Image (cartoon, coloured by chain):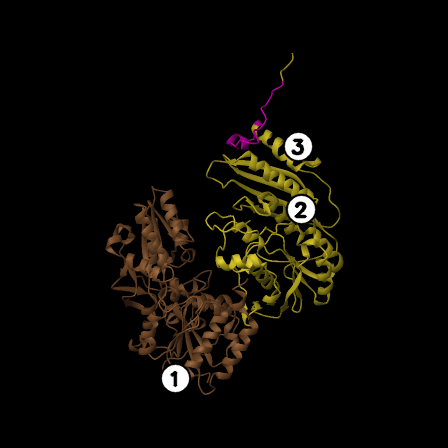
Chain colours: A yellow, B brown
Amino acid sequence: MNVPRLRTRKLDLRHGRVDLSHGAGGRASAQLIDEVFRNAFDNPILERGNDQAAFDLPAGRMVMSTDAYVISPLFFPGGDIGSLAVHGTINDLAMSGARPLYLSVSYIIEEGFLLADLQRIAYSMGRAAREAGVSIVTGDTKVVERGKADGVFITTTGIGIVPPGLDLSVERARPGDAVILSGTIGDHGVAVMSQRSNLGFETDIQSDSAALHDLVAAMVDVAGPSLRLMRDPTRGGLATTMNEIAQASHVGFLLDEAEIPVRSEVAAACELLGLDPLNVANEGKLVAIVAPEASDLLLTIMRAHPLGRQATQIGTAIADDQCFVQMTTSFGGGRIVDWLVGEQLPRIC
Amino acid sequence: MKHIDEYRDGKLARAIADTIAREARQDRSYHFMEFCGGHTHAISRYGIEDLLPANVQMIHGPGCPVCVLPIGRIDDAIRLAMRPEVTLLTYADLMRVPASGGSSLMKARAAGADIRMVYSTLDAIRIAEAEPDREVVFFAIGFETTTPPTAIAIQLARKKQLTNFTVFCNHVLTPPAIRAVLDAPSIPDQGSVRLDGFVGPAHVSTVIGTKPYDGFAEEFEKPVVIAGFEPLDVVQAILMLVRQVNNGRHSVENQYTRCVTEGGNTIAQTAMSEVFDLRDSFEWRGLGRLKASALQLRDAYGDLDAERRFGVETIDAADNPACECGDVLRGLTKPADCKLFGTLCSPETPMGSCMVSPEGACAAHWTYGRFRAKASAGVHTAGEPAAAS
């Protein structure tokens, strides 16, 4: 008997919306994965269609990291939640010195979300992953009732491999070490904030969202043994990152405000909104703590890379039982650079 | 940043600081109070104290609107917000101010109250228009700086005939607070701080002008220099104060001439007096109940007054007994000398209001200055010899 082949109407990717059936695990779910995600992420491991991804790993220590992305708005100058979810997790892996290899992704989508926006986000993720040489190999999709989420939430988990002999860790800073920053601070937070409807200011500032592993690889190549640790100053900004390192390594830091690069547009926006750029989030910058004798070489290498052109030494680790992060202000006085208290800006990543 | 960086020029600052050090007499000390939280913030943020000679000391005054708001009024706001029909709109820095029983607006929101942060009173009007089924209450606080925008919103609400918009008014006035600090010696058992002069308010003075300060500069024989909020403004104002003290003068001088005039902003003043009149008295945290020191909506605007619409009756609530915010606000105690400072009380878990707003003396010292020795030099009660001279 000739069974007629079931013909499914294609998803309306222009005007259609996600409904609860897309997360129910049935045919509609399969169709959403097929027509949106599989095309967007496009790699042989995902293509096999299993509930898990199986792959071999090169030698070295494996690193793993996970992060949830709930940013509002979903699209912002210089990126969107999709590219951010790739860059953010890659960077968390890369700060160990690792080469990132594979990502998993989980979507929680609010009922009624535009399929066109979902596709745009998925393709942006796929593009960001391909550009970084990383594959999105497994994933999950859930749909929740309208009002139970804000558009879309994305969680990514990544794994990578650290080259043998490299051990970067947050407790390894020592008095005398140099503090190196890869570029300007505050770009991401201000770019996102400029899109908030209730703030009503316009700017050309772009988020700095970028995958840093390539810059990291260059740094590890020349200065591996001298590198103590790296961190990307995301939520809470440079101030929080420096305090985390100070606490973990039981050292203090003395920073020089005049050396910390801030775009004038970012400085102006922060001025207007009463924010300190030191507390504003970044998504494509790193702080490296390095043995003092290696700092010049490291800076030369970083400045040769597009993501490290404005790299500069912003301070030094000092012995301090109280673990204070101090700063000489450009005005000539001294102050503490403290942890961010409370929420400065809700949902920036 | 043009028009900003010029006022943050470290080289110029050091030159002025050198002049201060040269001109400050070695046989005496100088104690100046910066009234405004904005100045406190600038002093801490830029490390201005490091530029001053040891015998020139700054004392942080009560000009932080969040800090002087008594707990009872926060309790009122929380009670209002817990009403199911009410949407309470507030400036963000009030969210974490501790209320009675360990509560705060932040905690009330987590418990289900509809509390939202706004940046402008006009946002409040927009929300009231967009959500006609909600009773939208704007939690108005601040000195003369934030009062005109509230007045404009009230006028606009009237013009638009909004029936679901009210203001919970907590606006207070600067001159009575300065007078209260200067009057302190007359309050028995409360001590007073030796003051040689004031750095006068920046933004407040753009609204009220320089004239309101003439009275107490004359009466209490204390110089006042109105200064902008940029660090160079502050350093220059300190030099001007040192010179007045040295010359035995006590005038009102205006360092902030780029914004402040003698008469102030008359449009803002007209809007304020059209909408508000004086309360008989109002409770200030740290200063007690001060006569004619706060504003309320005039009867003509009574229908837009949240206190009248919802029958708010403030119950005075006591501060934590160990909290020394009151003395800090009057310049009697330095933040680091409070037992709670940095132990039970920090910006994450504030016990007192001075630790909440970044303009509060305690929060500013904690956030920017706590690496300095826990020294109380510079605070002297009347009659004590000056340690630094």
CA gap between label 3 and label 2 equals 20 Å
1 and 2 marks on the same chain = no
Q: Main secondary structure of the magenta part?
A: loop
- Residue indicated by mark 1: B248
Image quadrant assignment for residue A262: bottom right
Residue A159 disc label: 2
Nearest the eye: A63 or B79: B79
Which region is colored magenta? A5-27
Q: Position of residue A163 (x, y in %)?
A: 74, 53
Is label 1 in a helix, a strand or a loop? Answer: loop
Give the side of residue B249 with respect to residue A307, left or right: left
A210 falls in the magenta region: no
Q: Position of residue B285 (x, y in %)?
A: 34, 65
Image quadrant assignment for residue A31: top right
* Rendered position, B144 above or below B109: below
Label whose residue precedes the other's in the sequence (3 or 2): 3
Nearest the eye: A152 or B175: B175
| Residue type marked 3 | Gly
Is label 3 in a helix, a strand or a loop? Answer: loop
CA gap between label 3 and label 1 equals 87 Å
Q: Nearer the viewer, mark 1 or mark 2?
A: 1
Is label 2 in a helix, a strand or a loop? Answer: strand
Give the side of residue B15 with respect to residue B245, left or right: right
Instruction: Say if mark 3 contacts mark 2, CB within 8 Å.
Output: no
Name the residue rendered at 70%, 57% in the picture.
Answer: A167
- Residue indicated by mark 3: A49
Residue B136 makes an appearance in the image? yes
Q: Which chain does tag 1 point to? A: B
Q: Which chain does tag 2 point to? A: A
Image quadrant assignment for residue A259: bottom right
